[in-house]
Image: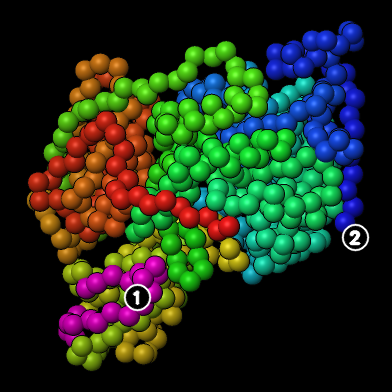
Amino acid sequence: MLKFFTFTLVLIISSTSLTEQSNENRNDSKPVYGFEVDNEHNQFLLDGKSFRYVSGSFHYFRTPSVYWRDRLRKMRAAGLNAVSTYVEWSLHQPTPNTWRWTDEADIVGFLKIAQEEGLLVLLRPGPYICAERDLGGLPTWLMTLEPEIKMRTNDLRYMRYVEIYLNELLTRIKPLLRGNGGPIIMVQVENEYGSFHACDLAYKQKLRDIMTRHIESKALLYTTDGNTDGALRCGVISGVYATIDFGVSTNVQNNFNLMRRYQPTGPYVNSEYYSGWLTHWGEHFQTVQTQNFTKTLATMLSMNASVNIYMFYGGTNFGFSAGANGGDKYWPQITSYDYDAPLTEAGDPTEKYFAIRDTIGQFLPLPNLPLPTVAPKGDYGSILLKPVARFFDNETRSLFTTTMGVYNTPPTFEKLAIARGFVLYETNLPENMKDPAILRANIGDRGLVYVDDYLAGTLSRTLKINALVLQNPYAKRLSILVENQGHLNFGNIIEDWKGIFNVKIDDKPTVNTWKVTGFSMDDITPLNTSTSVISMKGNLINGPIFLRATFTIANEPLDTYLNTAGWGKGVAYVNGHNLGRYWPVIGPQVTLYIPAIFLKKGENEVIILELEYIATNLKMKFQTFADFGKSEIKQFPN
């Protein structure tokens, strides 16, 4: 039988601005802080008073830190009294011996700003977070530390690093727990673990115990799982408050009744109430109707439920940080994480934003804050992109090579310590090939195949294309440029290796050695030293091309969008900032969001790594609005 308990907390510490109102009527000389469950009355107590939160998800790692306060203030102005954020392990520990806690990784700074803006915090440190991020936020170096390491289980090799990470993080955020006068009222243990196949009880309990050592009773530990009996049964943890996730077009009471089977007392909680949905490359942009959303929100609030809106502000998967989903097919996610959220990717309020505010206002007092407006955007016209370097030229390779070696068997990205980006695999073709020959290989995730430096075709994990006809029996050289399109972030497969596997020609394994070159492509600035000048348009039959353009901004920069229509597939950089992947021929995303902070008054630089096709006019343009192509309404199951 599952055991449940009530958090009780009476701590006396110094006052902060966030809690003046909740303590204003006390006779104590100092305020009393705490967050607990009142099981008798099925409610939360904040500082000893009845409380329920209406929160919104905003992940600090999806927008530059200079915008954190703006987004949080807009959330508070909408009537929210809390913000929920994941903590991305891979961001904070990019290598086993490297830690990042500043700039865009300044989680403590983010939490302090939230408190200053009058928002409580629901912290979701994982270690696994999903979040449509590469490998669900887990660092890829975990995959190579020990053979066959089993992540998200009580594998001691895995748990060793989990405990180091959690100790590093929780030590930093401890002063910000509610019991210490900070904004953090709840801390989530793992993330939707009931959707993972392992159902490892020892693992869940170990995480709980590690967190409890730091948090004690100064915040409430909780879990969240999908709205199925199996998910909750596997996801709940003894002594941890169990909550549920569900979207619109669903029976609210039935969902909360399901939660009651595993959390018999305490308030109802929907920890992920979906304002929109994630979108993959090759599908329509997913939306949720505002009217349906606010109707279900009002129903939950009328039941005194606490609700977290996922997402309230989505932001962007800059660089190569987007993940992928699996199942019947491999399906990578688009660069934008706009999510059809109440605040757009650029932080602008939408019709949904104001409708949510009106709904919240029926149940909670609204703050006396100015309402946000749509910020002006920069229309910086068209740019003419000039090809400046071939990706496969020796000079260019030397600029961007992260690792190089010769191997008998093609190594994975992970074994090369290339977490993201590209790897080029090259080998000699066997003599006396058939005419035509057939190349077979399993690919992770997309491979451009070149025979004697001439494009022969594409291998695709998404389309399950693992065979290709080689029409030149006299060719000498085989090259395969593999793109990592994102590690799986959800489902039962976590150890998602990237590269080429089981390579055969005419059903015979390749016997020659492989020359392997890895390109992380996080930093594009070395290209400025390149002197290559070429002329190229249309299909790139001899390999990818770097292109460059400059443009001038006369006044203070504004947010803008780069329109990639007419181009093939690639990566865009502005002033050295990796905007992420573009793929307009597949869609639905056509534009890439450029925050004003990435721009500067005066001359700016755009660099494009185009993999497949250069627009015949060699132009891209800036525009004042996002283009996500066709959209469709997300239909949630009842």
- Mark 1 vs mark 2, foreground winner is 2
Give SS at disc 1: loop
Give the left or right position of residue 596, taking residue 310 as reference.
left
Task: Give whichever of discs 1 and 2 has the lower sequence position.
Answer: 2
Amino acid type indicated by mark 2: Met
426, above or below 311, in the image: below
470 part of magenta stretch: yes
Give the left or right position of residue 442, taking residue 214 as reference.
left
Between 417 and 471, the one lying in front of the other is: 471
Between 511 and 577, the one lying in front of the other is: 577
* Highlighted magenta segment, given as a residue range: 456-475
Q: What residue is shown at x 41% (from left), y 76% (from top)? A: 442
Q: Is residue 306 visible?
A: no
13, above or below 67, in the image: above
Q: What residue is shown at x 48% (from left), y 27% (from top)? A: 354
484 part of magenta stretch: no
Q: What residue is shown at x 21% (from left), y 17% (from top)? A: 554
Q: Dot 1 corresponds to which residue?
A: 465
x and y, in percent, of residue 448 in the image: 29, 67
Q: Is residue 585 visible?
A: yes
Give residue 592's mark. Answer: none
x and y, in percent, of residue 550 in the image: 19, 32
Give SS at disc 2: loop
Residues at discs 1 and 2 in contact (Cβ within 8 Å): no
Q: Dot 2 corresponds to which residue?
A: 1
x and y, in percent, of residue 404 in the image: 40, 60
Q: Quadrant of the C terminus?
A: bottom right
x and y, in percent, of residue 22 in the image: 77, 17
